[in-house]
Structure formats: structure tokens, C-alpha cells
Amino acid sequence: MMRRSLIFDVSIDTVFRMSLVFSIFMFFAGHNAPGGGFIGGLVAGAALVLRYLAGGSDGSQQVGARFAHVMLGTGLMIAVATGFGGWVWGTEFLENTGVGAELPLLGTVKATTSLLFDAGVYLVVVGLVMEALGSLGHEVER
Amino acid sequence: MTFVLITTVALLYGVGAYLIMARNLLHIVIGLGLIAHGANLLLLLAGGAPGSPPLVGAEAARIADPLPQAMALTAIVITFGITAFLLAMAYRSWILHGDDVVEDDIDDRRIARQAPSKDDS
Amino acid sequence: MNALVVLPVALPLGAAGLSYALNRYPRFQRVLGVATLTTVLGLAIALLVNVQANGVLVKAIGNWTGPIGITLAADLFSVIILVVSMVVLLAVLVYAIGSPRTSSEARFFYPTYLILTAGIALSLLTADLFNLFVAFEIMLSASYVLITLGGSRDQIRHGTTYVIINLLASMLFITAIGITYAAAGTVNMADLAVKLGDISPAIRDALGALFLLVFGIKAAIFPLFFWLPDSYPTAPAPVTAIFAGLLTKVGVYAIIRTQTLLFPSDGPSTLILVLAGLTMVVGVLGAIAQNDIKRILSFHIISQIGYMIMGLGLFTIAALAGAIFYIVHHILVKTALFLVGGLVEHTMGTSRLRRLGGMVHRAPFIAALFLIPALSLAGIPPLSGFLAKLTLVQAGLEINQFLIVGVSLAVSLLTLFSMIKVWSGVFWGTPDPAAPPGEDVGTGRLVFPRLMVLPTAALVLLTLVFVVAAEPLYRISEHAAITLLDPTLYIEAVLGR
């Protein structure tokens, strides 16, 4: 068991939450501006890595680690399913379609199929980081 | 500008090629990483003249060619993943053998064993 | 109808996700794997029928048409290889289910195997050079995992070489793509076929050589084959079988595709013929020097690659048809041989010739399963190897390329010699007095898992069907060769004209 630094611990705790919020912002910013599922996932993954660095192999630190493979697999399925979805609403494989609406307070909001695809990518990336932390981090330390 | 980049590409390939001739897996990984950087830079160079970022809303005439950038991004992700895998293998090799030396061909070793050693002659 | 082109790639990919999400349930993973591959095999056959009737099928991903978007295109050549690949992938999956392994390996085996399937399908169907690179990486990443699954000493040692060589080849591939894009401004293969004609011949030749080098490493042609015999035999038997049967052939597919579409020559190419001859000779000589079934068979892969490249080098319709015919024959036969090798190793506990012997008395059925593909590989009439070699030899004689024809015939004899060596080492002679691990204690009979024998027998049977159906098969191959040599149809279909 490695020694934990209090300062690192406390500051990571703040940064961790902020990074997660930022990753969600990145996720929604995507497609027409820098961002998207991959980058959002990477930011969230980086947050998880920071958390691991602070907490080490303390089992309680990685809450969702047991479901990492479910996350990764589901993400891949969502991404592929979005491709097939095109046939359901009458477009080509992986073609981008969506609906836009004027909502109070939020302004114009668009929901596109590429957002769904990106959600899949996000899950794959986060799941992958968690799997890697599990097998290359926790298992190795043991 | 382009000349500097081309020289950089050549340098990266050269240093990388030198490093992958080492015995030690870590040297090889670093060498492959350098070659990968060279290749990605080459992809970027293939896109032609620099311009503003290819984002929606930018002036079409002034933006850089986005295709090589997309290709470079893909290539970076792929090489990153495989490099991580190689490092994991180096770690495993270290656990099993205590070193990370990349060995000779099986038949090379067989032939080497059959040849009279230099001390005998 | 064009949706058929996407499904062989997308289905295994989605199934891999499901299989990985539920990797605590091996029974479900098995059912899912077999179901997916059976479906994809059905789709591939439907695709074959469709392409034969309607010509090249094209699908633009996301409705971004070529040359900007990524296009998938199925022509007869790619679909033929796709069908055979799926047959072999399915057979080997059943074999893998039957062969024992630890549960932690199994958890990763099935999803990775499905990813491998998706990568192979995408490599065969894509009409875009960069997408081909991505497809190769999907396939290779899966193969890296499969070759080191289990993480034993030998696997790590030789797997390392395999990964390094392939990563280096991938870097060269990116380099070649970068230079291509700088020279022609496109990576769509159909668009390139048109535009490469306009650029300076020197750059064109350099690019052609670079692509030959890149795919030559993946296909293990002379002098880039050295990694293969070391890395393949260390993996578990089903993995070795699928690698031996398929992966190098995907490299051959890429060589034939790029050299016919992008860098066509006017007549027989001396460079490729010399490479083909040397690949055959060096491979078979290497095989003769070995004393282990798996290593002998690995060297034979190299030797056989030479024949396929020879078909490309002759560059006539008959020769390319022969090459396609040969690839189909080789995928079936080679996989079957490796599966038998795996059976022998599983039951006898070793694959070294010196410690085996006398199996013809103790397991005559297994001996027969080995004998048929082995003789076929050596080109004994009337088996499939004989027909495949005959078409190539005839094509060579037609255009007076006597040297390469002579070499190929001599190599056939040497192949027969080394097959006889395996036969007399494993199946004839006196058995080792010590009881092998696969022996039933009570009856003293050798036990072979039924799920491992069944797919092996099915593949051997298919090689025999290949002989009976040779005429129509050759007709299809010839048709495919005609489209390869006259790519205007392919180009027009991909560019959507």
C-alpha cells in the first residue's frame, strides 16, 4: 500500500469533479466545434487516471471498475447500432440526421445521430481507460 | 517552413531506424514511436500549404486541407494503442525473464550453435 | 441491396461489443460467436450471388460519396475471398470452442476473434487506401491479442517480434499513404487509379515498390518472411490455424488489389516473378530443414505465397484466375492442415516429429484427415492443389515463362518430400512407448475432442468439394480476373458515375 499525500488527495478531488464536468461539456460541444465523444472520453479518462494516481490501488477508489467491460462493450454496440439506425429512419448507413428545436432558456438545441454515435465512442474510451487501469494498474500493484 | 519540416521528418525516421536496431525492447518502442511521429508529420505535410483550422464557419478558401489531419489523428490513436500494448508486453517479458531483450530467430540460433565457436579455431 | 456490403463488417463489430460486455458468460459468447459468423457467411454468399449478377456493389458510408467519403466496394475478387474467409473463420471458431483453454483466456478470445473477423472483412471490402490501413490495424490489433493470449514465455518472446515487424510495416504504410496523398491528392483507390496515370512515372514506380514492400511484409514474401515461422507456431492451435490460413492471404489480396488497380504493368513483371520464385524456393527449403509439424507447415505458407504472387507476376487473365483459384485452395487446405497439427499436438502432447510416430494405426481417421490436404498441398492429382497449380503452370506456359514454371514444378516436388517427412514421422513408424496425455486410460485408445475433429473434417471435405466443383469455381475466378485486369467497371462504380 503506497503512502498517500494529503495535498495531492484533496486537490485531485476538486480537479476530478471539474474534469468530469468539462468532459461532458466537450462531449456536447463536438461535431461542429472542437470536442466530441473521443475527446470527452479522453478527458474523463484522464480524470480517472488522476484519481488512480492519488488513491493508488485502494479498492474503494474505482467504483465502476467492475463494470468497465460492460461500458466498453455497450459503447461499441451503441456506435454500430447508430449506423444501422440510419435504415430505420430512412437514411444511409452512418449518415448524420437530426432534429433541431427552439427550447426556452436554452435557445436552439439540436439532437443528431452523430451525438448518439459519439456517446458510444465516449463509453468505449472511458471503459477502455478503466480496463487499462484495472489490468495494468491495480493488478500489477498487487 | 516546409524545408524545416521535411528535414525533421527525415531526422525522425533516421533516429527511429537506428533505435529499432537495438536489442532492448524499450529502445525499439521509442524508435517506433519516433518513426510514427515522422510518418504523422509527413501526412500533415502531404496536405499542402498551412491554413486556418478547418471548422464550420471558417472561410473556405483559407482553411487547411482537413483530410490529412483526420488521417494523422487516426494514425496517432492507432500507434498509441499498439505502443501501449508493446509496453505491456515488455513488462510481461520482464516479469517472466527479468529482461526485455528481443531474441534472435530460432533458426539463427540453431545455426549459431552448430558453427564452431571462435575460441576453438 | 447495397446494404449487404456493410453488414459483414458491422455485424461482427457489434457482436464483439455484446460479447465483451457479457464476458462473464462464456456459453453466451460461444453461441453469439457461432451465430454471428454463420449469419455473416450467409450474407457473404448472398453478396457473391448478387455481385455475380449485378457487378460491383458499392456503399458510401454516411452517404458521403467517393472520392471524398469512405467507400466500401465489393467486386468478385473480394467477395470470393470473403466467402472462403468466413467459411474458415466459422470452422476454426467451432474448433476453438472444442479445444480446452482457461476461462480468463476465453473471456477475451471471443470478442477479439469477432474484431478480427470485422477487420478481415473490412480489408477485403474497402475501396479506400487509408481505410485499408485502418482495416489492417483492426485485424492486426486483434491478432496481437490472440497471438499473446495466455502470456506464456514463448508467446511473449515471439509475439514481440511479430508486433514490432507489423508495427514497422504499418508505419511504412502510413508513409506510403502520405506520399500518395502528396502526389495525387486522394486516397480513394478508384480515384487514384485515374489520377496516378498523370503523375511522373518515377514517383509512380517508387510508390508501387513501397506498397509492394508494405504488403510484402504482411504477406511474408521473400525476403520479408523471416518473422512468420517464429511467431505463428507459438500461438494456440486454432489461432495459428486462422493466422496461417487467412492473415497472410489478406496481405496477398492487398498486393493483388493495389498492383492491378493502381500500378498495372503491361505484361509479365520480372521483379514480381523473381520474388515469387525466390519465395517458393526459400520457403520450401526452410520447411525441409525443420523437425516440428507446426514449423514445417509455417514454412510451407511462405512457399505457397510464392505461387499466388507468381500468378500476379504473369499478369494475364488466366494467371490471375489461377492465383485467385490458388488462394481459395490454399486457405482451405492450409487451415485444415494446421487444425490436424493442433489435434496431433493436443492428443500426443507434442508436435516434434522425433517424439511422434505410429499414429496411422492408432488414429487412422486423423491420418486420413492429414493425408488429403497434405497431398493436395504438394499438388498430387486429382486434388485441389493439383488443379490450382495446373492453372498457374498453363498460364505460365502460354506466355513462355518457362523458368518460373520450372521452379514452381521443382518446388512442388520438394513440398511432396517434406510432406512425406511429416507423414513418416507422425503417422508411420513405431509409437513412443510412453502414454500420450490424450490416451484413454481404460481402453488405451487415443481420444480426440469431437468438436475439434468435426470442423477439421468439414474443411477437408470442402477441399474435396472444391475438386468436384472446380469447373464453375474456375469460371468465377476467371470472371474476377477479367474485372481485375480491366478495372474501369470498378472505378466507375466506386466513383458513382
Image: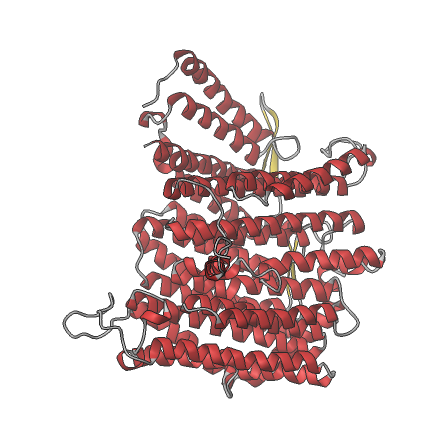
Q: Residue at x 74, y 84 (%)?
A: C400
Taking depth in this image into account, of A53 and A30 the one nearest to the observer is A53
- Measured as percent of width and height from the top left, residue C336 is found at 43, 72
Residue C373 is at least partly visible in this image: no
Give the vertical position of C394 relative to C356 (above or below).
below
- Measured as percent of width and height from the top left, residue C488 is found at 76, 67
State the residue lying farthest toward the top. A7
Residue A82 is at least partly visible in this image: yes
State the residue lying farthest toward the bottom. C382
Give the vertical position of C70 relative to B1 (above or below).
below
- Measured as percent of width and height from the top left, residue C19 is found at 40, 50
Give the vertical position of C84 relative to C358 (above or below).
above
Quarter of the image holding residue A58? top left
The quadrant of the picture occupied by the N terminus of chain B is top right
Q: Residue at x 55, y 59 (%)?
A: C226
Q: How is the image coloured?
A: secondary structure
Taking depth in this image into account, of C478 and C410 the one nearest to the observer is C410
Give the vertical position of C271 relative to B21 (above or below).
below
Taking depth in this image into account, of C308 and B96 the one nearest to the observer is B96
Q: Residue at x 47, y 47 (%)?
A: A77
Please state if C203 lies on the left or on the right of C255 as rendered. Answer: right
Q: Residue at x 19, y 70 (%)?
A: C440
- Measured as percent of width and height from the top left, residue C476 is found at 61, 78
Taking depth in this image into account, of C44 and C204 the one nearest to the observer is C204
